[in-house]
Every structure is written in structure tokens, then in C-alpha cells.
């Protein structure tokens, strides 16, 4: 998979920036809750916009977008499902666990540290960023459950 064109990342970043600016207080402090505008961006057909909104929502650690983000884990677009997993991991949702492991297995370096940290916080286990050990733990802890840990190309961070 080719990396995302930077011009589209810029456009999506502007949209998210505007949504974020709408919730910044006049004195520059960030509120503790995310803007509903960010949640609305999750229904966009533009993967760049969705990923950028999820990245910002993860920074807030506000569970307001969980219902909209859960179905995004099933996206065919790695840009979308990885950011959905990182957001859901940031708000400590156990549904994110296998997706965070998968993000690590496919060598998505820009997600490694966050994925490892969120996995530790959600599960109480600590395999650092050894995602193969995480996969083995998940399979042992979830007998009979199936999850596609197949490695697929992912977008690069620009």
C-alpha cells in the first residue's frame, strides 16, 4: 500500500484543526471533553479525515466517540482501523486489544509505543512492544476466538 499523499493529510489536518479550535477556550486551555464536531468527522468517507479525528480524540481520552469508533475497527483501510484501535485503546476499551496487537505485528512503528502502553493498561500484562508475545497471550487468553492477525501493508506517517 502506498503512503497517503501529504496534501490530503494537510486538508484533513485543517478540518480537524478547525474542529479542535472550536472547543479551545479563549485562554488557550483544552477542555476535558472532545468536540461533537470531531465525532461527526468519523462518519466521513475520507480516511484521512477519519484518522485525523481519531488521533485528536485519542489525545482527549474522551469516550464520547466509542459508539462511532467501534465499527471502524472493521475497516478495510489500515489508516482507519489502526487509528480506531489507538483511540479505543486510549479510552481503555478491551475491544481494541487484538487490533492494537495487530498494529504492532504489522510493524506500524508510529503506533508501537501507544499500542504497547494501552495494551498494558487494558490487560494488566506487560510484554512491552513484543507483539508476537502479545499475540500468543491473546490467543491463549481467548481460546476458541478467532482473529485475523495477518500482516498487511500499512500507511506510513508523514
Image: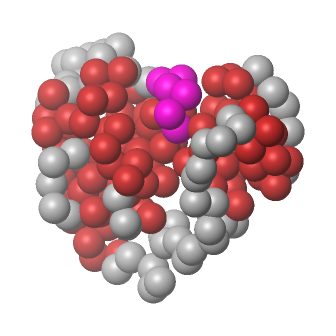
Asked whether 91 falls inside the magenta stretch, the response is yes
Classify residue 67 as left or right of residue 80: left
Which residue in the rendered view is the most extreme toward the front? Answer: 144
Please state which of residues 46 and 19 is positioned toward the viewer in this rendering. Answer: 46
Q: Is residue 92 visible?
A: yes
| Badge count | 0
- Residue at (64% x, 32% y) in the render: 118
Q: Position of residue 23 (x, y in %)?
A: 20, 25
Asked whether 116 falls inside the magenta stretch, the response is no
- Residue at (79% x, 39% y) in the render: 140
- Residue at (81% x, 27% y) in the render: 125
Classify residue 75 as left or right of residue 134: left
Q: What sort of colour scheme is used for the picture?
A: secondary structure
Please state which of residues 138 and 12 is positioned toward the viewer in this rendering. Answer: 138
> What residue span does the magenta drawing correspond to?
90-96
Q: Is residue 52 visible?
A: no
Is 153 rendered above or below residue 25?
below
Which residue in the rendered view is the most extreme toward the bottom? Answer: 2
Q: Position of residue 8 (x, y in %)?
A: 26, 72
Is 119 rendered above or below residue 151?
above
- Residue at (37% x, 66% y) in the render: 76
Is 53 rendered above or below residue 63?
below
Q: Where is residue 54 in the image (x, y as percent from the top left)?
A: 35, 43
Q: Position of residue 111 (x, y in %)?
A: 61, 52
- Asked where in the image residue 78 lies, by quadrant, the reply is bottom left
Amino acid at each position: 500500500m502506498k503512503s497517503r499523499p501529504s496534501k490530503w493529510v494537510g486538508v484533513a489536518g485543517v478540518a480537524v484543526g478547525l474542529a479542535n479550535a472550536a472547543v479551545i477556550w479563549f485562554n488557550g486551555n483544552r477542555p476535558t471533553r472532545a468536540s461533537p464536531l470531531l465525532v461527526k468527522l468519523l462518519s466521513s468517507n475520507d480516511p484521512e479525515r477519519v484518522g485525523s479525528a481519531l488521533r485528536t480524540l485519542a489525545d482527549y481520552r474522551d469516550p464520547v466517540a466509542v459508539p462511532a469508533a467501534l465499527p471502524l475497527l472493521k475497516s478495510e483501510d489500515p489508516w482507519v482501523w489502526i487509528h480506531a484501535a489507538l483511540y479505543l485503546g486510549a479510552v481503555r476499551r478491551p475491544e481494541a486489544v487484538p487490533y492494537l496487537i495487530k498494529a504492532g505485528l504489522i510493524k506500524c512503528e508510529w503506533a508501537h509505543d501507544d499500542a504497547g502502553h494501552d495494551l498494558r493498561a487494558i490487560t494488566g500484562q506487560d510484554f512491552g512492544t513484543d507483539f508476537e508475545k502479545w499475540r500468543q497471550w491473546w490467543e491463549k487468553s481467548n481460546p476458541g476466538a478467532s482473529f485475523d492477525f495477518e500482516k498487511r501493508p500499512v500507511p506510513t506517517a508523514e
